[in-house]
Image (cartoon, rainbow, N blue to C red):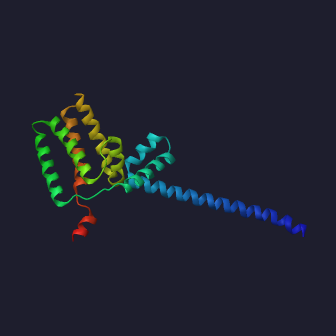
Amino acid sequence: MNLQLITLGPIALAIAVVLLIVIFACLYIQRRRVTAALRQRFGTEYERVVIEHGSERKAQEKLLDREKRVEKLDIRELDPADRQRFLEQWKTVQSHFVDSPAEAVTQANALVTSLMDRRGYPVSDFEQRAADISVDHPHVTENYRTANTIASRLAKGEVGTEDLRTAMIHYRALFDELAQETVAAKKEAA
């Protein structure tokens, strides 16, 4: 009987080691899937947050927190009248660029902020706005950050016409994203 216990000890230990290896492998695979999903979803914003927080684990926690926060917001589609009004305002802002590029960038910034507010995004703090936008519109978040940086430099008189043109292009990309009708809204209307 003692001989059986002695031989079961190494077998039990081997089984326990194999189970631990399987558990760690599953956790590793799951972590890689989460990383891949977040990288794909957030694009360049993922890398920016990793650099900002110093580790992938902390960055992933922050990005998952963003998703939870935005889920709680009342983000809504624009109704057709609002969409049309914003599109007309954008055309006006864009037409001002030829005669007054600096004023047009300031107006574009204000119009994008107004559009975000109308859609239900909190607009009090730029970093929070950019973080919130990154959840549903990750590929234009960097555009928004760049445009905002240029607009901030504009207030200090540190930009040239090419910078202003770049800001308008970036604001336009974000504006187009926020003003477009989503597939869900199109299906609902049909």
Front residue of 83 and 118: 118
- Residue 147 is situated, as x and y percent measured from the top left of the image, at 26, 40
The N terminus, quarter of image = bottom right
Q: Give percent across and percent down for residue 120.
A: 29, 53
Farthest top residue in view: 157
| Quadrant showing the C terminus | bottom left
Instruction: Reply above or below: 53 against 66.
Output: above
- Identify which residue is drawn at 69% across, 62% down: 18
Relative to 49, does residue 25 appear above or below in the rendering?
below
- Count of number-bearing discs: 0
Q: In the drawing, does residue 33 fall left or right of residue 189? A: right
* Left or right, 94 with reference to 155: left
Residue at figure coordinates x 53%, y 59% from the top left: 30
Question: Which of the 4 quarters of the picture holds residue 161?
Answer: top left
Q: Residue 175: horizontal and vertical position, in percent? A: 23, 50
Looking at the image, residue 180 sits to the left or right of residue 99; the answer is right
Image check: 33 left or right of 27? left
